[in-house]
Amino acid sequence: DARKRSAQLAQALQTLKLHDGDAVATIAWNTHRHLELYYGVSGMGAIIHTVNPRLHPTQLVYVLNHAQDRALFVDLTFVPLIEAIWDKLESVRHLVIMTDKGHMPACKIQGALCYEDLIAAEDGDYEWPTFPEDTASSICYTSGTTGNAKGVVYSHRSSVLHAFGVAVPGVIPVGPDDALLPVVPMFHVNAWGVPYAAAMCGYKLVMPGPRLDGVGLTELMNNEGVTCYWGVPTVHLSLLAHWRSSGESVPSLRTVTTGGAAPTSALIEGFRSRGIEFVHGWGMTETSPVATVSSLTRADADLDDATQVARLTRQGKKLFGVEMRIVGEDGQVLPRDGKTFGELQVRGPWICSAYLGNAPGSALDGEGWFPTGDVAVIHPDGTMQITDRKKDLIKSGGEWISSIDLENAAARHPEVAMAAVIGIAHEKWGERPLLIVQPAPGASPTKESVLEFLEDQVAKHWLPDRVVFVDALPLGPTGKVQKSVLRERYSA
Ligand code: AMP
């Protein structure tokens, strides 16, 4: 069905006079129609630009204009969002609403088309064109916490190689007998390559649409016998909280895969204690995104539980095809001793070489390395561990403090749901860490109990001077804690 409908869509795009190299934007949930767009758009030689609906409207306008999108496909949920910015869009000629005739809304935009009508007019007898493998297939913009987001363009070659990299055995345990639920959005970095890897290997895909709360996900997983699901840590946290309060579970679930932000050991234990295997990957928009994956190997089987969990908090080993190293401030390559930290650099066929509109190769150094802006150590066994974003590192009295390690330590406190640490300017020490805590539902931890809890886990000079409690930490468009917002709020 997906193949036939993708072919009908490709024909419909031709009927709409879209050509090779035209950008076609989507603002959509994970649905079968979005999957058809992935194949129909790229397969006919155009470029699918997946847009994150959580962007601020001015950023939405910016990315749609910057990518010069010719057509825009939107889910029903996002029609009001588009109505509000429609006048500011410079290149979009067609708006297609991803629904059938019976659900077409009264849309303020003249000439809005209905997805099902559009493809029903075509017969699906379509010969997919062939073109050079380095033809652009998709575009995703970085989540850009400061300034305008930057566009990353993926090619057919890079997307296929990345899908191979993710799908080979030993990376993420998923195969043709699995039912995979991607909660990771198809509007950000090609949902970690799931749409391509699934078709390559024949996994059953279960598409959640807009219903991503604990109740909705649990019901869907149980109805569809889901065995694997992929998502960012904040989604996992709300699912675990729902399971704890409702007593519900998903007996078919075998593996949870996470990425996008560092998972805490409490999160990992939450799944492992239910017999669910935990897999953790690292990457970024610029790396397609998967570059490293952490999962337990045969050699780890004899380790005690706490050591296994600690291993899984590491970001893991590089995928075949990716190279990585850490470098110091003057560019010297640093040892892989698990202690020395430096900026992580990566290189490989699915690592971005330039941002959209910039000169080829301009994102790389002379030897083809991409500077990630993440700070990491590499352990002697080759596993990489992120300690911070370069801009989030805290320097106190000449000593570095890793905000991720401190957050992880605080989040082990049973009354803490999430924690964030930022550096605050300090006259004597240069900077001191401020800990911001989102309590677990119904809990009210005290500053004293949190600090006492940290004392056993971190060096004395790492202990925050102050702890702030908030109802909810601010989350950015891709589910990461927005430290820039916290800095604005608390740095003074
Ligand atoms: P994005 O380009 O929005 O996907 O964000 C990429 C950034 O998210 C990376 O550079 C990291 O700072 C962070 N990130 C992604 N995965 C992880 C992870 N597993 N652990 C820690 N940070 C991560």
Image (tube, rainbow, N blue to C red):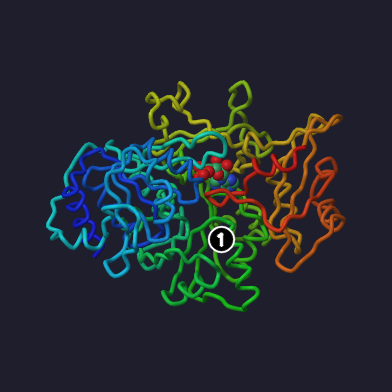
For the point 41% across and 30% down, which residue is it?
A: 353
- Relative to 77, say whether 324 is above or below: above
Q: Is mark 1 within 8 Å of ligand 1?
A: no
Residue 322 rendering spot, x and y as whole percentages: 45, 39
On-image quarter of the N terminus: bottom left
Amino acid type, callout 1: Val
For the point 56% across and 60% down, which residue is it?
A: 235
Q: How many marks?
A: 1
On screen, residue 83 versus residue 398, left or right, reads: left
- Relative to 230, say whether 420 is above or below: above
Residue 425 rendering spot, x and y as whole percentages: 78, 33
In which of the image's four quarters is ligand 1 placed? Answer: top right
- Relative to 255, say whether 465 is above or below: above
Question: Could you classify mark 1 by the number of other residues whose Cα lies within 10 Å: few (under 14), some (14-19), or many (20 or more)?
Answer: some
Secondary structure beneath label 1: helix
Residue 390 in sight from this viewpoint? yes
Label 1: which residue? 235
On screen, residue 372 versus residue 347, left or right, reads: right
Q: Camera-side residue: 157 or 55?
A: 55
Q: Camera-side residue: 214 or 455?
A: 214
Residue 316 in sight from this viewpoint? no
On screen, residue 24 versus residue 430, left or right, reads: left
For the point 46% across and 26% down, which residue is it?
A: 364
Q: Camera-side residue: 413 or 26?
A: 26
Quadrant hosting residue 301: bottom right
On-image quarter of the C terminus: top right
For the point 37% across and 62% down, which residue is it?
A: 31
Residue 29 rendering spot, x and y as whole percentages: 41, 58
Residue 208 rendering spot, x and y as whole percentages: 43, 65
